[in-house]
Image (spheres, rainbow, N blue to C red):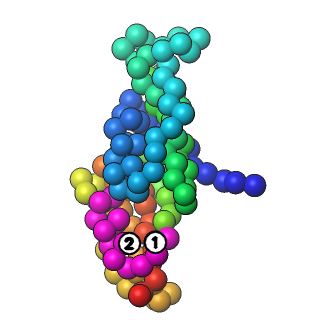
């Protein structure tokens, strides 16, 4: 079994995946737009992503642009969690993800003997970054 996140955006999915690619690495693959979709989509939305994936050795994130008439509510019921190899990698990743967004909990040493921080990125997605103290 494999469980993976599927993120929803309001027309800026390509921009968000490019941002995550800059932060996390990997390749954006399986891009499909609404161009040939047999759906009632406005012409100016046909170039938006109906599906795409950011894949690398340790992760796969799927994402899409919801149809314009689909209600989307930003919330905190889902957070992306990343365990890095060391505190420096965690610090760098935390800084990248929080740039233009909001730090919810500073990246700092926590009671479970790790480095940890929470942020909301500029697309409204919440991230938890965890690293060993080494």
Q: Position of residue 10 (x, y in %)?
A: 40, 32
Residue sitting nearer the eye, 37 or 59: 59
Q: CA distance from mark 1 to mark 2?
A: 6 Å
Start-end of magenta stretch = 83-97
Residue hosting label 1: 84
Overall secondary structure of the magenta section: helix
Whether residue 63 appears in this view of the structure is: no
Q: Which mark is residue 90?
A: 2
Vertical position of residue 39 compared to residue 60: above or below: above
Quadrant placement of the C terminus: bottom left
Residue 50 within the magenta-colored segment of the rendering: no
* Residue 92 point in image, percent of width and height: 31, 68
Residue occupying image coordinates x 41% and y 54%: 25
Q: Check residue 90 for magenta coloring.
A: yes
Query: Which residue is located at x 33 percent, y 51 percent?
Result: 22
The answer to whether the residue labelled 1 contacts the one labelled 2, judged by CB atoms less than 8 Å apart, is yes
């Amino acid at each position: 079994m494999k469980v993976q996140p599927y993120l929803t955006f309001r027309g800026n999915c390509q921009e968000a995946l490019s941002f995550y690619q800059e932060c996390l690495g990997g390749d954006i693959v399986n891009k499909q737009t609404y161009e040939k979709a047999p759906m009632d989509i406005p012409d100016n939305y046909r170039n938006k992503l109906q599906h795409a994936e950011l894949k690398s050795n340790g992760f796969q994130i799927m994402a899409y642009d919801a149809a314009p008439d689909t209600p989307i509510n930003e919330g905190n019921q889902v957070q992306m969690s990343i365990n890095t190899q060391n505190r420096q990698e965690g610090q760098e990743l935390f800084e990248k993800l929080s740039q233009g967004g909001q730090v919810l909990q500073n990246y700092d040493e926590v009671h479970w003997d790790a480095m940890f921080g929470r942020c909301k990125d500029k697309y409204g997605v919440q991230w938890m970054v965890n690293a060993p103290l080494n």
